[in-house]
Image (cartoon, rainbow, N blue to C red):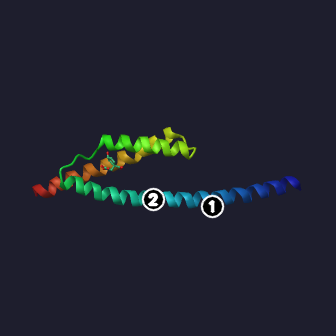
């Protein structure tokens, strides 16, 4: 029946899209892992030199840049900003933990 074939075709197309989504999600995880590997090193550097975990001026530059990139890529700039903020808040939390343990190791 035509309806059954349409449904089978739709399922095949959906599976194709899902395969791409799975590849993209894997790439995002790998890119985030690399970003956090890098920011961990930044956290150590900052802690060793007594630099503050957060740098609001740098964040403002990143937001401006990413909002423009998002616009050019037809991605919602508000979403891009929220995503960056979400990631950066987690980075700052890591920086604070590193600074606390750095202080503890200096004291001990
Ligand atoms: O560039 C820095 O100073 C960082 O610590 C990295 C980073 C980021 O994740 O991009 C995190 C915290 C700062 O507020 C700004 C940027």
From the top left corner, tell me how far across and down residue 15 is, in percent.
68, 59
Number of callouts in the render?
2
Q: Quadrant of residue 33?
A: bottom left
**Which quadrant would the N terminus be assigned to in this image?**
bottom right
Residue 54 falls in which quadrant of the image? top left
Callout 1 secondary element: helix
Horizontally, residue 8 falls left or right of residue 74, namely right
The residue tagged 1 is 19
Identify the residue position indicated by label 2 in the image.
31
Q: Assess disc 1: are there few (<14), some (14-19) or many (≥20) residues with their C-alpha within 10 Å of its C-alpha.
A: few
| Image quadrant occupied by the C terminus | bottom left
Q: Is residue 29 above or below residue 68?
A: below
Q: Residue at x 42, y 40 (%)?
A: 64
Q: Is residue 49 above or below residue 67?
A: below
Mark 1 or mark 2, which is nearer the start of the sequence? Answer: 1
Give x and y (percent) for residue 21.
Answer: 59, 56
Task: Give the x, y percent position of residue 60.
Answer: 37, 40
**Cβ–Cβ below 8 Å for labels 2 and 1?**
no
Q: Residue at x 33, y 44 (%)?
A: 58
- Residue at position x 34%, y 50% from top? 91
Q: Secondary structure at mark 2?
A: helix
**Residue at the outermost top position:** 78
- In the foreground, 21 or 78: 78
The furthest residue to the left: 107
The image position of residue 30, as x and y in percent, is 46, 61
Report whether the residue tagged 2 is closer than 8 Å to ligand 1.
Answer: no
Left or right: residue 99 compared with residue 60 = left
Q: Which is more toward the observer, 11 or 50?
A: 50
Q: CA distance from mark 2 to mark 1?
A: 18 Å
* Callout 1: CB less than 8 Å from ligand 1: no
Instruction: Tell me, for residue 106, which label it has, or none.
Output: none
């Amino acid at each position: 029946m035509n309806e059954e074939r349409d449904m089978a075709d739709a399922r095949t197309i959906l599976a194709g899209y899902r395969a791409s989504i799975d590849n993209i999600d894997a790439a995002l995880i790998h890119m985030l892992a690399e970003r956090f590997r890098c920011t961990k090193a930044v956290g150590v550097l900052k802690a060793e030199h007594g630099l503050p975990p957060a740098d609001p001026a740098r964040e403002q530059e990143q937001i401006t840049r990413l909002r423009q990139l998002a616009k050019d890529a037809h991605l919602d700039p508000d979403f891009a900003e929220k995503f960056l903020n979400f990631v950066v808040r987690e980075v700052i939390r890591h920086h604070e933990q590193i600074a606390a343990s750095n202080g503890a190791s200096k004291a001990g």
